[in-house]
Image (cartoon, grey):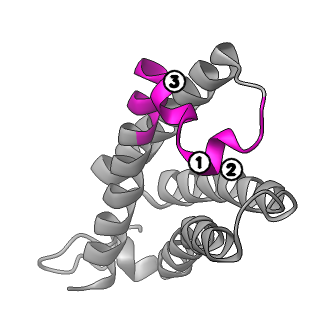
């Protein structure tokens, strides 16, 4: 696979996780709340959870647009938006691990860390203009 393929696959993975997460939270907020990594920070707030679900779906729309267009500015914008959300999420939860066991906290941080490392790696791939050139015959006058 070339850089473009890896970039598209990674964006698709991020988009898919946001669709699943967003639908889960928007449609079944009580079930999401019961997940112990979420419920250890009460109180339950259905409004806030449904808003978060909607925001996750909105981010999925931008990521899907980036997958479909594979245009550099859109890809970079989508990845930076994802990173803003995932870094702030990681930082918050890293400061609120006390109610969790060491193993659970480590697993949670690994999950949230992956949500930072993956888009950062994709952003690194997106820095290469060649990743946005269409496959096939090279047109010297084409702009990336």
* Residue at (47, 80) in percent of width and height: 125
The front one of 40 and 124 is 40
Front residue of 5/31: it is: 31
| Distance Cα–Cα, label 2 vs label 1 | 21 Å
Tag 1's secondary structure?
Answer: helix
Q: Nearer the viewer, mark 1 or mark 3?
A: 1
**Between 4 and 116, the one nearer to me in the picture:** 116
The percent coordinates of residue 110 (x first, y second) are 58, 75
In the picture provided, is 125 more to the left or to the right than 104? left
Left or right, 102 with respect to 108, comes to right
Picture disc at residue 85: 2
The residue under label 1 is 36
Please give the residue where the numbered disc 3 appears in the rendered image: 29
- Earlier in the chain: of badge 3 and badge 2, it is 3
Q: Quadrant of the N terminus?
A: bottom left
Nearest to N terminus: mark 1 or mark 3: 3
Closer mark to the observer between disc 3 and disc 2: 3
Is 85 included in the stretch rendered in magenta?
Answer: no
Question: Does residue 1 sit above or below 105 in this rendering?
Answer: below
Mark 2 vs 1, N-terminal side: 1
Q: Crowdedness of circle 3 by 10 Å Cα count: few (<14), some, many (20+)? A: many
Q: Residue at x 56, y 60 (%)?
A: 76
Q: Give the magenta part as a residue range.
A: 21-42
Query: At numbered mark 2, what does the secondary structure look like: helix, strand or loop?
Result: helix
Residues marked 1 and 3 touching at CB (< 8 Å): no
**What predominant SS class does the magenta segment belong to?**
helix
- Taking 110 as reference, is 13 above or below it? above
Numbered circles on residues, count: 3
**Residue 29 counted in the magenta span:** yes
Mark 1 vs mark 3, CA separation in Å:
13 Å
């Amino acid at each position: 696979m070339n850089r473009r393929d890896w970039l598209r696959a990674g964006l698709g993975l991020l988009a898919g996780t946001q669709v699943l997460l967003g639908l889960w939270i928007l449609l079944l907020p009580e079930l999401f709340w019961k997940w112990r990594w979420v419920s250890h920070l009460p109180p339950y707030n259905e409004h806030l959870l449904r808003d978060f679900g909607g925001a996750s779906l909105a981010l999925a729309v931008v990521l899907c647009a980036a997958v479909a267009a594979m245009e550099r500015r859109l890809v970079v914008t989508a990845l930076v938006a994802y990173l803003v959300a995932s870094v702030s999420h990681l930082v918050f939860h890293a400061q609120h691990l006390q109610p969790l066991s060491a193993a659970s906290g480590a697993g949670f941080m690994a999950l949230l860390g992956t949500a930072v490392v993956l888009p950062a790696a994709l952003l690194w791939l997106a820095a290469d203009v060649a990743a946005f050139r269409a496959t096939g015959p090279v047109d010297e006058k084409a702009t990336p």
